[in-house]
Amino acid sequence: GENVEQHPSTLSVQEGDSAVIKCTYSDSASNYFPWYKQELGKGPQLIIDIRSNVGEKKDQRIAVTLNKTAKHFSLHITETQPEDSAVYFCAASAGNFNKFYFGSGTKLNVKP
Amino acid sequence: GAVVSQHPSRVICKSGTSVKIECRSLDFQATTMFWYRQFPKQSLMLMATSNEGSKATYEQGVEKDKFLINHASLTLSTLTVTSAHPEDSSFYICSAYPSSGGSDTQYFGPGTRLTVL
């Protein structure tokens, strides 16, 4: 089955700096890679996703890159703000209603 | 759009009792829903896949007789924790795939905090 690894487990940055979270996956059948933000006591919220036919996707301060050959994908947050502080999860899926395989999560702390 | 609700948001119960958690897709139909369990500072652990009109598919190690799942309509799945024990205390989260459009994206509910005394 699929195995998703996520690094780092914690990340502290100064407000305004960039943050990068990396994930690797093992199953070449995976073709959909979402990123979720989870605040304390709440459910995960989709912030960006990418499909395997695309190498990069950007939405304002958030971007995701995918390297299919190396089987890794990354989340990039620029100009970080204190409200970006949360736990971020990556996931991989074969799409088409298949289950998600989640990374272990990264706790991002943006210091004012 | 794509809103998933859960009820209740918090529940406290005594050992030995059963608790039902509801998961609703508010503005879309969902043939497939998932139930997850999350321990503090850990990732989401998939418990089961809930399919409308059929039996749920449980992940290895999850007791189907303890965690009863019913997906009776295209907008509602329920998880019943039977004969709850303190070790069942956890954060339970559901998610749903919109049925239309060959969706890749799961939308998550806000979670239910279960505390068993």
Image (cartoon, coloured by chain):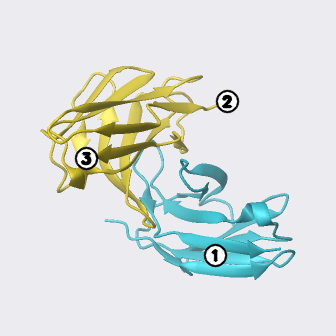
SS of the residue under disc 2: loop
Of marks 1 and 3, the one in the foreground: 3
Q: Nearer the viewer, residue B81 or A3?
A: B81
> Could you give the CA–CA distance between mark 2 and mark 3, rounded to whole angstroms?
37 Å
Residue A79 picture location, percent across and down: 86, 71
Mark 2 residue crowding within 10 angstroms, few (<14) / some (14–19) / many (20+):
few
Residue B95 picture location, percent across and down: 46, 40
Type of residue at label 2? Answer: Gly
Q: Identify the residue under disc 2.
A: B1
SS of the residue under disc 1: strand
Mark 3 residue crowding within 10 angstroms, few (<14) / some (14–19) / many (20+):
some
Q: Chain of mark 2?
A: B
Q: Identify the residue under disc 1.
A: A21
Q: Nearer the viewer, residue B10 or B32?
A: B10
Provide the letter of the chain coloured yellow.
B
Type of residue at label 3? Answer: Leu
- What color was chain A assigned in the picture? cyan
Q: Which mark is residue B117?
A: 3
Of marks 2 and 3, the one in the foreground: 3
Type of residue at label 1? Answer: Ile
Tell me if label 2 and label 3 are in contact, CB under 8 Å.
no
SS of the residue under disc 3: loop
Residue at the spot 53% in from the left edge and 47% down from the top edge: A43
> Could you give the CA–CA distance between mark 1 and mark 2, rounded to whole angstroms?
28 Å
Residue at the spot 69% in from the left edge and 67% down from the top edge: A55
